[in-house]
Amino acid sequence: MIAVEVLIVIFVVTVVLVGIAKIGAPIADAFAERLKLKFQELEPSEERQLKARIETLEEEIRNLKRQVSSMQESVEFAVKMQQEPGEKIHIPEKKKV
């Protein structure tokens, strides 16, 4: 009688462990993959590409700043040209960026 109970307990423990392994393995794999992606280092070629993109974006921003400044000067000139003699028009100061 005791032998049957021991076999049943061993069977139940085996079934539980196999079930946990079947369910836990995919979860552990997914978690490990997520950690790999989170802490993945860039390859040298990817790093060069990102640096090149950053430099390109910085140059575009500098060009846009120049264009905005030029447009602001053109608007100020146009306002001054339309101004009647003796009339004072207040033009706000340029914002430093």
Image (tube, helix red, strand yellow):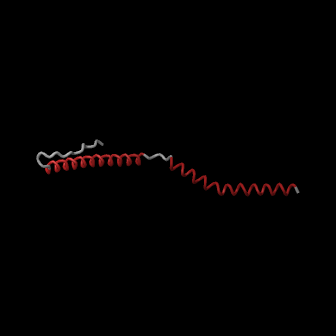
Total numbered labels: 0
State the quadrant of the C terminus.
top left
Residue 7 locus on image (x, y percent): 81, 56
Between 22 and 73, the one nearer to me in the picture: 73
Q: Position of residue 38 (x, y in %)?
A: 51, 48
Judging depth in this view, the residue of 12 and 65 nearest the camera is: 65
Residue at left 16%, top 50%? 78
Q: Is residue 23 left or right of residue 54?
A: right
Residue 76 at x, y percent in the picture: 19, 48
Does residue 67 appear left or right of residue 18 in this picture? left
- The quadrant of the picture occupied by the N terminus is bottom right
Specify whether 24 is left or right of 78. right
Q: Is residue 9 left or right of residue 52?
A: right
For the point 78% across and 55% down, which residue is it?
A: 10
| Residue reaching furthest to the right | 1
**Residue drawn 50% across and 46% down?**
39
